[in-house]
Image: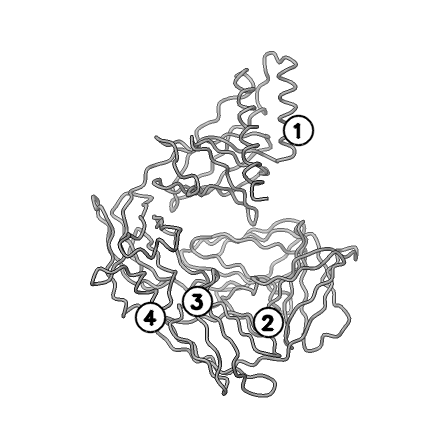
C-alpha cells in the first residue's frame, strides 16, 4: 500500500489541472488570486487568504460541457475536502523532491503536499479555517505562516521562494578529524546540529526529549540523511541555509548543549567548528541507581536510556542490584527497566551535563495485568488505542509515557502489562473520542474496569515566549491527564479533552512551576497562550 499516497497525490494534481483548464476557458468565473504576503520563519507570521474560486462572479455563458465538468469537480472535491494548489516560484526546476518538506497543520491534523518537479503542488483533504503552512526547500529560505482557507472547493496560493545564504559546514577536531567519528567512539551516533540565531546563545538550551535541537532560529542545518555516509572521514557535515543575510551567530549543539559558537560575517563562504572530543566527553552524564524487587536486590536487570528517537545507552545490574551507566547524553532521557518476574518500568529522567546523578533505589513491583474495557457515551464497546503512565514515576516537565500502546479490540477489551502502582490511562478512538481513567494496579481485580470515551474538543496551546513551555492538564483531584510540551521547533500543541472542568498547570523547560488556572471545556475548542 506504499503506492497509495502517491496515487492520491497524482489524482489530486490531475483534478487541479482539469479544473484549471475549465476555469481558463471562461475567465469570468473567478478573479485572479491576490498575491499573498509571505514572511520567512522567525518573523511575524503573515495571514494570507487566497481567492475563493467559484464564490464570486458568474460565467457569462456556460454550455452543458462546462456544467458537467464543474459538477464532476465538485463531486470529487466533496470526497477530498478543500484542495489548495499553486506553484512554488523558483528560477529553476526542483531536482530532489524527496528533500522538500511542505505541508499544512491544524492542531494534530497534518496534510502533506504533493509537489511536481516544475513547482506545481496540491494539498487535498483540507477544511476551512486557519492552518499553519510550512515549506522547506533545499537552497531556499524556509517559509512558515498562517493561511486561511475559505469554503471554496479549490483555492490557489503561489509561494515565491527566496534564495538562502548557503554555507558548507565542517565539524572537526584539532587534528582535523571529523568530530562525529570521534564521538562515535563514545557511542554517540546522533545529536550534533548547527543552529543560527540573530544573537549569541547564553548557555545551554533547555533540556529536550529529542535526539537533537534543530530547525530553530534563522537557519537550517541540512545534513546527509544516510547515516553510513556520515561516517566518511573526508566528507563535510552538511550545509547551513540562512533565512536572512549575515551577520548572524551560529552555535554547534550536541542535543541541547552548546559546544561552540561563532559569528557569521557577510561574505563568509564556509562554517568551520573545531572542538576537543575530550571536552565533549566531560559533558556526558552518568546515571547510578540500585534496583530492588519484592525479595530484595535485582540482579541481571536491564536499564535502557534513550532519546525519543531511540539510540542511547544501557546497563545491567550486578548481584547487589547496582547499575552505573556512563556516556549518557544529557537531557530528558526515556527510561526502560526490565527484570524477570517484575513489572517493566517506563518513565523519564532529566540528566544534567557533566554530572553523575545518584537516582537512589528504584523499586520494581510484581507484574500484574490490568484488564480494561473502552465504551462510548451510550455504553457500547468501541475500538481504541490506549496509553498508560505511572503517576508516581512522572514529574514535570516530562512527557507522558505515550510511546507504548495497547489496542482495545472490537469488544472494547484491552490488557495493560503493569505493576502495583497507580496509572493515568487514556483511550482514543479513530474519530477523536477520548476518555481517561485513574487505575490502581495494587487493587485491580479480575473484573474489567471501564474507560468511557466521549466526543472531545481541542485545547490549543501556543508558546509566546522564547523558552520551552509545558502545559499539564489534571483532573480536579490533581491526577495527570495530558502533557503538552511546546519546544522551540514546535511552539504549538493540541490535546483533545471531553467537556468538563480541569486544571491547567504551566512549567518551564526545567520543571519549575509558572502558574495554574481553571480550565473548562464546554462544547468548543479552547485556545490559550503561554508566556
Q: Secondary structure at mark 4?
A: loop
Gap in Å between the C-alphas at discs 4 and 2? 31 Å
Gap in Å between the C-alphas at discs 3 and 2? 25 Å
| The quarter of the displayed image where residue 418 is located | bottom right
Task: Mark 3 or mark 1: name the one nearer the start of the chain.
Answer: 1
User: Nearest the camera: 269 or 218?
Assistant: 269
x 39%, y 75%: residue: 326
Task: Mark 3 or mark 4: name the one nearer the start of the chain.
Answer: 4
Pointer 4: what residue? 283
Q: Position of residue 43 (x, y in %)?
A: 38, 44
Pointer 1: what residue? 75
Query: Cβ–Cβ below 8 Å for labels 4 and 2?
Result: no
Query: Cβ–Cβ below 8 Å for labels 3 and 1?
Result: no
Query: Cβ–Cβ below 8 Å for labels 1 and 4?
Result: no
Pointer 3: what residue? 312
Task: Mark 1 or mark 2: name the one nearer the start of the chain.
Answer: 1
Task: Mark 1 or mark 4: name the one nearer the start of the chain.
Answer: 1
Q: Secondary structure at mark 2?
A: loop
Task: Mark 4 or mark 2: name the one nearer the start of the chain.
Answer: 4
Q: Secondary structure at mark 1?
A: helix
Pointer 2: what residue? 391
Q: Which mark is residue 153?
A: none
Q: Secondary structure at mark 3?
A: strand
Gap in Å between the C-alphas at discs 3 and 1? 51 Å
Gap in Å between the C-alphas at discs 1 and 2? 50 Å
Gap in Å between the C-alphas at discs 3 and 4? 15 Å
Task: Mark 3 or mark 2: name the one nearer the start of the chain.
Answer: 3
x 55%, y 28%: residue: 14
Q: Nearer the viewer, mark 3 or mark 2?
A: 3
x 27%, y 48%: residue: 168
Amino acid at each position: 500500500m506504499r503506492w497509495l499516497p502517491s496515487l492520491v497525490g497524482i489524482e489530486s494534481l490531475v483534478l487541479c489541472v482539469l479544473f484549471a483548464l475549465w476555469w481558463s476557458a471562461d475567465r469570468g468565473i473567478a478573479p485572479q488570486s491576490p498575491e499573498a504576503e509571505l514572511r520567512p520563519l522567525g518573523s511575524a507570521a503573515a495571514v494570507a487568504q487566497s481567492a475563493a474560486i467559484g464564490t464570486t462572479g458568474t460565467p457569462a455563458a456556460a454550455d452543458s460541457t462546462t456544467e458537467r465538468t464543474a459538477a464532476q469537480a465538485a463531486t470529487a472535491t466533496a470526497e477530498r475536502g478543500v484542495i489548495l494548489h499553486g506553484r512554488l516560484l523558483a528560477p529553476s526546476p526542483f531536482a530532489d523532491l524527496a528533500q522538500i518538506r511542505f505541508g499544512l497543520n491544524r492542531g494534530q491534523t497534518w496534510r502533506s503536499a504533493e509537489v511536481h518537479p516544475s513547482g506545481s503542488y496540491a494539498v487535498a483533504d483540507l477544511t476551512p479555517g486557519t492552518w499553519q503552512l510550512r515549506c522547506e526547500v533545499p537552497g531556499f529560505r524556509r517559509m512558515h505562516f498562517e493561511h486561511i482557507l475559505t469554503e471554496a472547493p479549490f483555492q490557489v496560493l503561489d509561494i515565491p521562494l527566496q534564495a538562502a545564504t548557503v554555507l558548507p559546514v565542517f565539524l572537526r577536531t584539532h587534528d582535523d578529524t571529523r568530530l562525529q567519528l570521534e564521538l562515535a567512539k563514545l557511542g554517540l551516533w546522533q545529536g550534533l546540529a548547527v543552529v543560527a540565531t540573530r544573537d549569541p546563545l547564553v548557555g545551554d538550551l533547555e533540556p529536550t526529549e529529542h535526539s537533537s535541537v534543530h530547525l530553530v532560529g534563522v537557519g537550517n542545518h541540512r545534513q546527509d540523511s544516510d547515516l553510513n555516509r556520515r561516517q566518511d572521514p573526508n566528507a563535510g557535515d552538511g550545509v547551513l541555509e540562512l533565512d536572512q543575510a549575515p551577520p548572524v551567530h551560529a552555535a554547534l549543539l550536541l542535543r541541547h548543549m552548546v559546544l561552540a559558537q561563532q559569528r557569521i560575517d557577510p561574505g563568509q563562504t564556509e562554517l568551520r567548528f573545531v572542538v576537543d572530543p575530550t571536552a565533549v566527553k566531560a559533558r556526558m552524564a552518568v546515571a547510578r541507581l540500585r534496583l530492588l524487587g519484592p525479595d530484595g536486590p535485582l540482579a541481571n536487570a536491564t536499564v535502557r536510556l534513550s532519546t525519543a528517537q531511540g539510540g542511547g545507552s544501557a546497563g545491567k545490574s550486578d548481584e547487589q542490584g547496582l547499575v552505573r551507566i556512563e556516556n549518557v547524553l544529557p537531557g530528558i532521557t526515556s527510561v526502560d527497566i526490565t527484570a524477570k518476574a517484575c513489572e517493566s518500568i517506563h518513565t523519564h529522567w532529566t540528566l544534567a551535563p557533566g554530572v553523575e546523578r545518584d537516582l537512589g533505589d528504584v523499586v520494581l513491583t510484581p507484574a500484574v495485568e490490568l484488564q480494561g474495557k473502552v465504551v462510548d457515551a451510550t455504553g457500547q464497546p468501541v475500538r481504541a488505542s490506549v496509553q498508560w503512565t505511572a503517576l508516581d514515576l512522572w514529574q514535570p516537565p516530562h512527557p507522558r509515557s505515550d510511546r507504548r500502546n495497547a489496542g482495545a479490540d472490537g469488544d472494547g477489551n484491552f490488557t495493560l502489562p503493569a505493576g502495583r502502582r497507580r496509572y493515568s490511562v487514556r483511550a482514543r478512538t479513530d474519530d477523536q473520542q477520548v476518555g481517561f481513567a485513574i487505575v490502581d494496579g495494587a487493587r485491580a481485580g479480575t473484573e474489567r474496569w471501564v474507560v468511557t470515551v466521549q466526543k472531545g474538543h481541542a485545547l490549543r496551546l501556543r508558546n509566546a515566549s522564547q523558552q520551552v513551555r509545558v502545559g499539564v492538564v489534571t483532573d480536579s483531584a490533581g491526577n495527570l491527564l495530558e502533557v503538552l510540551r511546546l519546544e522551540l521547533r514546535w511552539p504549538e500543541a493540541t490535546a483533545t479533552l471531553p467537556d468538563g472542568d480541569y486544571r491547567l498547570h504551566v512549567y518551564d523547560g526545567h520543571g519549575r512551576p509558572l502558574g495554574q488556572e481553571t480550565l473548562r471545556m464546554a462544547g468548543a475548542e479552547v485556545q490559550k497562550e503561554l508566556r
